[in-house]
Image (cartoon, rainbow, N blue to C red):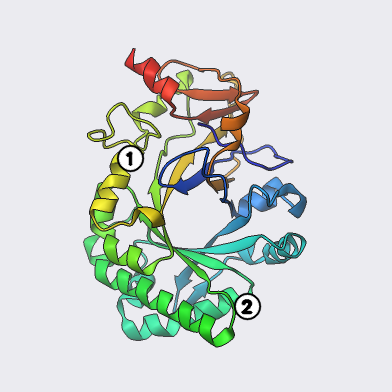
């Protein structure tokens, strides 16, 4: 199963894809795709409003803002694309735009804010005002971005309090303004260790409109025989698995584990990371560094399933789709069957 982005003008770069779909990947779930952009990606890929087909991408999610020194911190690369966003919304009335609010686990300022009621309740109204002022339709929030996970720098219950207070204020804002309520997307890392350390699953589900479960399939961009690296050895969120009840690298296993902790199936959105990486010739001595050039998509993944496509296995250890110089990792029923044989 391969996600093909609905972007008409792809520029040279390293592009990665998130797709999310309600619990199961199915051709029947084609009603929502949210295209997610990093600001740097949009600038370097020179994406414009004509590049987005709202029949396939009615939601746009912009990454990201964070908290610092008692205020919302917004990088200029992010705010500079707001005029573009407003034009896109004007040209495409059905488009909804979400803002991603991520923070590093190791951020002391963020930690102090969400665990302290007075600071939390002071920040949330300012945050909602910012969302309204800049014409967003919702927000995605997460406590767990980054790799610094020290036990003294996060608080499971206080983060759940933040989600609860944010949802309460979003509802109150809607009542006061008479406007549609801003959507609240919680976000949970699918890995058992991350879930246990960072989240009160049942409370986050209770107070979020939807909950995104990140099923990371993250691996080095240095891929292939030259580097003696098989991405299959690191892929821990398989789309399919021979035994979903015991294979802790499969999506089904992790979804079921999340639901067992108090998750709600109807609210669960799966995020799977697929990475097409620009495939340089092995004889190249120096690779161009495109930085964090990323184009993320999530939603019901349907188009390629309907259209089919030519699949080429680049080498046996990794199920890979290769089109010209673009390489896409995927994990499908055929590859599982081939590996089983």
- Taking 115 as reference, is 212 left or right? right
CA gap between label 2 and label 1 equals: 39 Å
Query: What residue is at 40 percent from the left and 43 percent from the top?
Result: 216
Where residue 27 sits in the image (x, y, percent)? Answer: 52, 37
Quadrant housing the C terminus: top left
Where residue 193 sits in the image (x, y, percent)? Answer: 24, 50
**Given this view, does label 2 or label 1 mark the residue nearer the observer?**
1
State which tag comes first along the sequence, 2 or 1.
2
Secondary structure under badge 1? helix
Circle 2 residue: 133
Secondary structure under badge 2? helix
Q: Which mark is residue 65?
A: none
Circle 1 residue: 252
Where residue 50 sits in the image (x, y, percent)? Answer: 77, 50
Q: Is residue 117 above or below residue 92?
A: below
Q: Is residue 338 above or below residue 158?
A: above
**Residue 132 appears in view:** yes
Where residue 6 sits in the image (x, y, percent)? Answer: 66, 42
Query: What residue is at 68 percent from the left and 48 percent from the top?
Result: 44
**Residue 318 appears in view:** no
Task: Spot the residue most to the front.
Answer: 28
Nearest the viewer among 98 and 183 is: 183
Query: What residue is at 41 percent from the left and 79 percent from the top?
Result: 168
Nearest the viewer among 101 and 288 is: 101
């Amino acid at each position: 199963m391969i996600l093909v982005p609905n972007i008409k003008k792809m520029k040279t770069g390293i592009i990665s894809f998130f797709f999310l779909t309600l619990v199961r990947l199915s051709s029947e779930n084609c009603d929502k795709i949210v295209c997610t952009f990093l600001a740097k990606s949009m600038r370097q890929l020179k994406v414009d409003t004509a590049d987005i087909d709202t029949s396939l991408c009615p939601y746009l999610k912009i990454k990201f803002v964070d908290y610092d020194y008692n205020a919302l911190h917004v990088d200029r690369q992010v705010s500079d694309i707001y005029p573009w966003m407003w034009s896109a919304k004007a040209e495409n009335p059905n488009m909804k735009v979400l803002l991603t609010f991520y923070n590093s686990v190791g951020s002391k300022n963020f930690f102090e804010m969400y665990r302290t009621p007075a600071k939390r309740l002071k920040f949330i109204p300012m945050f909602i005002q910012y969302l309204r002022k800049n014409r967003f339709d919702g927000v995605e929030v997460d406590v767990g971005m980054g790799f610094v996970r020290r036990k003294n720098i996060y608080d499971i219950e206080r983060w759940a309090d933040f989600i609860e207070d944010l949802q309460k204020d979003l509802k109150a804002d809607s009542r006061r303004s008479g406007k549609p309520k801003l959507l609240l997307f919680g976000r949970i890392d699918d890995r058992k260790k991350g879930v246990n350390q960072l989240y009160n699953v049942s409370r986050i589900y209770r107070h979020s409109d939807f909950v995104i479960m990140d099923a990371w399939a993250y691996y080095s961009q240095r891929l292939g025989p030259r580097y003696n690296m098989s991405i299959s050895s690191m892929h821990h969120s398989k789309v399919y698995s021979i035994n979903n009840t015991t294979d802790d690298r499969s999506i089904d296993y992790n979804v079921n584990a999340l639901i067992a902790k108090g998750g709600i199936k109807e609210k669960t959105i799966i995020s799977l990371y697929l990475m097409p990486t620009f495939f340089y010739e092995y004889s190249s001595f120096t690779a161009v560094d495109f930085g964090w050039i990323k184009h993320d998509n999530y939603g019901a993944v349907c188009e390629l399933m309907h259209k089919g496509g030519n699949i080429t296995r680049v080498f046996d250890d990794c199920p890979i789709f290769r089109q010209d110089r673009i390489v896409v990792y995927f994990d499908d029923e055929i590859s599982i069957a081939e590996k089983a044989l």
